[in-house]
Image (spheres, rainbow, N blue to C red):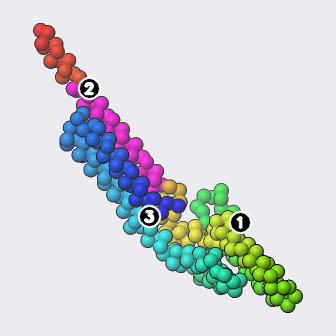
Amino acid sequence: MIGPGEEIIIVLICLIVGIIACALCFKGLGMVKTISLLIIMILVLAGHALWFFGTVLPVRVQYQREYGAYINMAYTQATFESIKNEVRVVWAKMNTTFAGDDFDHTYNTLLYWNQNYENSLRAQNNYLSALDDRIDSYIEQYDLLKASAGSSMLADWYDVSINNLRQETRRDGGLDWVISGAWLIKYYPTVYLVSSYGIDFIILLVSAILWWILLAVSYKGQDERTTQTSNVHTVGRRV
């Protein structure tokens, strides 16, 4: 997923390349056409940047506040109990956000061929329930080991077990592999469509291609007119 830093770099690279291209074609195009093409390019890049920083980024920040922060915290916690608390916050928020929705037919994608159980809120809900039970199992095992195992063995078991649990929170898309897409579709379908399928960058790429075609055609036309004028002058001198 493209972040703010990458977005700035992409826009700057496009801008620099465009300026260099205009500078190279300045003699053939003339000042007016060069400036006009440069303005068109700047407007396209500005529109793309405005869309990202004005729409996409605020939506991401909102999701981060509602879900992402708790998912990140679940990974960084040092005890089973604290991981369980973060998981339960995500689980409770999911049930609040999608209250009344059909979990069996609420998906993280709009592509009908991917709308199956593994991408449904039912699978997400069942997974969080199973994960909650797994954490309870770890806690029960820890309580049993405390009464029988030595401190060194107990510490080793705890480290291995909690690291396994942390990795589980990042496996196959993380704790919110369904929630994230379903949330976007529910509240911000346009952002989902444009960002998830790269439509914003397709638009930018198409704009860049059209801009280069316009630049090449303009330069070629100017070059042909210059050649014709030169030929006319040569014939005139011969006559």
Q: Position of residue 107 (x, y in %)?
A: 63, 67
Mark with earlier residue (3, 2)? 3
Q: Residues within 10 Å of mark 2 (few under 14, many from 20)?
A: few
Residues at discs 2 and 1 in contact (Cβ within 8 Å)? no
Residue occupying the far bottom of the picture: 147
Secondary element under disc 3, as helix, strand or loop, is helix
Mark 1, secondary structure of its residue: helix
Give 49 or 79, whichever is nearer the viewer.
79
What amino acid type is highlighted by mark number 3? Pro
Residue highlighted by disc 2: 224
Sequence-earlier tag: 3 or 1: 3
Residue located 55% across and 72% down the image = 183
Quarter of the C terminus within the rendering: top left
Amino acid at dot 1: Tyr
Task: From the top left corner, tell me how far across and down residue 110 is, in percent.
Answer: 58, 61
Image: magenta residue range? 199-226
Name the mark nearer the viewer: 2 or 1.
2
Q: Nearer the viewer, mark 3 or mark 1?
A: 3
Task: Characterize the magenta stretch by its predominant secondary structure.
Answer: helix
Q: Is residue 151 visible?
A: yes
**Which residue was labeled with disc 1?**
117
The extreme top residue here reads 239
Residue 33 location, quadrant: top left
Residue tagged 3: 4
**Residue 54, relative to residue 80: is it above or below?**
above
Q: Mark 2 or 1 closer to N-term?
A: 1
Q: Nearer the viewer, residue 77 or 191?
A: 77
Please report the residue visible at 53 percent of the width from the left and 61 percent of the height from the top. 1
Distance from label 2 to label 1 (Cα)? Answer: 62 Å
Within-10-Å neighbours for mark 1: few <14, some 14–19, many 20+: some
201 is within the stretch colored magenta = yes
